[in-house]
Image: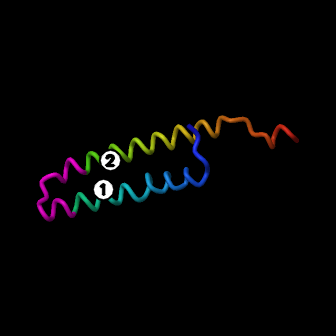
Amino acid sequence: MIFNNKFYNVIKWTVLTALPALSAFIGVIGKAYGWEGTDLAIISLNAFTLFLGALAGVSAAKYNSQPNDTEENK
């Protein structure tokens, strides 16, 4: 699956910035308030982040392996 550039940038920002920050926030606040499911929530969120990162990585690899039409026309 190859994503378009805008969608890829949104996924990349989400995976590299938003989800790790959310995971840290949930971990700190959850432990501070004594929430019971904090560890499970963090593990689940990190697994989802890893899944999205893998999709973005596969998409980038496929995109970069495509022949570049502009180089062929020179």
Tell me what residue is drawn at x 44 percent, y 55 percent. Answer: 14
Amino acid type at image mark 2: Asn
5 over 57 or under it: above or below: below
The residue that mark 1 highlights is 23
Q: Is residue 53 above or below residue 27?
A: above
Residue at 88%, 41% (x, y): give it. Answer: 74
* Image coords of residue 60 (percent x, y): 57, 42
First to last magenta residue range = 29-41
| Circle 1 crowding by C-alpha within 10 Å: few under 14, some 14–19, many from 20 | some
**Placement of 19 over or under 32, stated as above or below:** above
Q: How many circles with numbers are drawn on the protein?
A: 2
Q: Quarter of the image containing the N terminus?
A: top right
Q: Residue at x 81, y 43 (%)?
A: 70
Where residue 29 appears, as percent x and y from the top left, is: 21, 64
Magenta stretch, main secondary structure class: helix
Disc 2 element: helix
Marks 1/2: CA–CA distance: 7 Å
> What's the residue type where badge 1 is placed?
Ser
The residue singled out by tag 2 in the image is 46
